[in-house]
C-alpha cells in the first residue's frame, strides 16, 4: 500500500507541476501603488514639458539677441560711413572757401584782378537811436570759423 501510494503521488506530482507552470503568476495589486506610479509619471511628463518649454524660450531669447546685435552692427556701420562722408564734405567746404579756390573760380568765370582795389568800410546802426557808425575792425570780435561751429 505504501508503495502504491507513493506511485500515485509520483504520477500526480508531475501533472501538478505542469499545471502550476501553465497558470500565470498572480499577485495582489496595491491600488495606492498604482495611483502613486501614475502621479509620478504625470509629474515626470510635466517636468519634461516644462524643461522643453524653458529650452525653447531660451533659444528664442538668444535668437532675438542675435538679431538685435546684427541691427546694432548695421547702425554702427552706417554711423561710421556718415561720419566719413561728413569729414569729406567738410574738407570740400574748406577747400571751396580757400582764397586760392575762390581766385581760380573767379578767373574761370572771366573776372580780372583790379589794379587799384577799393576797400569798403562796413557800417551798422549805432546804439544811440539810428545814427550810422563805422565799424572798427580792431574792436570787433573775430568771425567764428564755420567748421568749428558745426562741431559745437
Image (tube, helix red, strand yellow):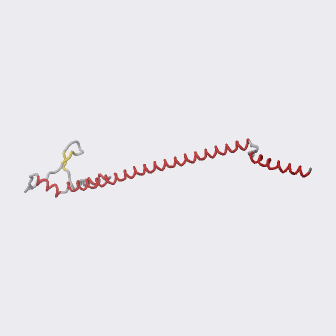
Q: Residue furthest bottom?
A: 100
Q: Is 146 left or right of 54, judged from the image as shown?
A: left
Q: Is 53 left or right of 94, judged from the image as shown?
A: right
Q: Residue furthest right?
A: 1
Q: Which residue shows up at 79% across the image and 47% down it?
A: 15
Q: Which residue shows up at 85% across the image and 49% down it?
A: 9
Q: Measured from the top left, where is residue 49 in percent x and y?
A: 58, 45
Residue closer to the observer: 19 or 152: 19
Residue closer to the observer: 135 or 11: 11
Q: Measured from the top left, where is residue 70 in percent x and y?
A: 40, 51
Q: Measured from the top left, where is residue 47 in percent x and y?
A: 61, 46
Residue closer to the observer: 63 or 68: 63
Q: Which residue shows up at 92% across the image and 50% down it?
A: 1
Q: How many marks?
A: 0
Q: Quadrant of residue 141?
A: bottom left
Q: Which residue shows up at 14% across the image and 54% down it?
A: 105
Q: Measured from the top left, where is residue 3 in percent x and y?
A: 90, 52
Amino acid at each position: 500500500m505504501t508503495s502504491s501510494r507513493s506511485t500515485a503521488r509520483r504520477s500526480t506530482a508531475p501533472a501538478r507541476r505542469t499545471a502550476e507552470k501553465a497558470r500565470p503568476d498572480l499577485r495582489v495589486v496595491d491600488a495606492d501603488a498604482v495611483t502613486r506610479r501614475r502621479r509620478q509619471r504625470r509629474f515626470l511628463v510635466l517636468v519634461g514639458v516644462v524643461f522643453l518649454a524653458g529650452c525653447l524660450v531660451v533659444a528664442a531669447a538668444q535668437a532675438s539677441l542675435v538679431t538685435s546685435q546684427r541691427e546694432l552692427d548695421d547702425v554702427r556701420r552706417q554711423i561710421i560711413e556718415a561720419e566719413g562722408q561728413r569729414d569729406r564734405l567738410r574738407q570740400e567746404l574748406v577747400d571751396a572757401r580757400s582764397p586760392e579756390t575762390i581766385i581760380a573760380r573767379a578767373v574761370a568765370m572771366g573776372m580780372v584782378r583790379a589794379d587799384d582795389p577799393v576797400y569798403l568800410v562796413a557800417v551798422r546802426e549805432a546804439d544811440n537811436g539810428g545814427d550810422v557808425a563805422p565799424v572798427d575792425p580792431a574792436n570787433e570780435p573775430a568771425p567764428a570759423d564755420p567748421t568749428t561751429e558745426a562741431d559745437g
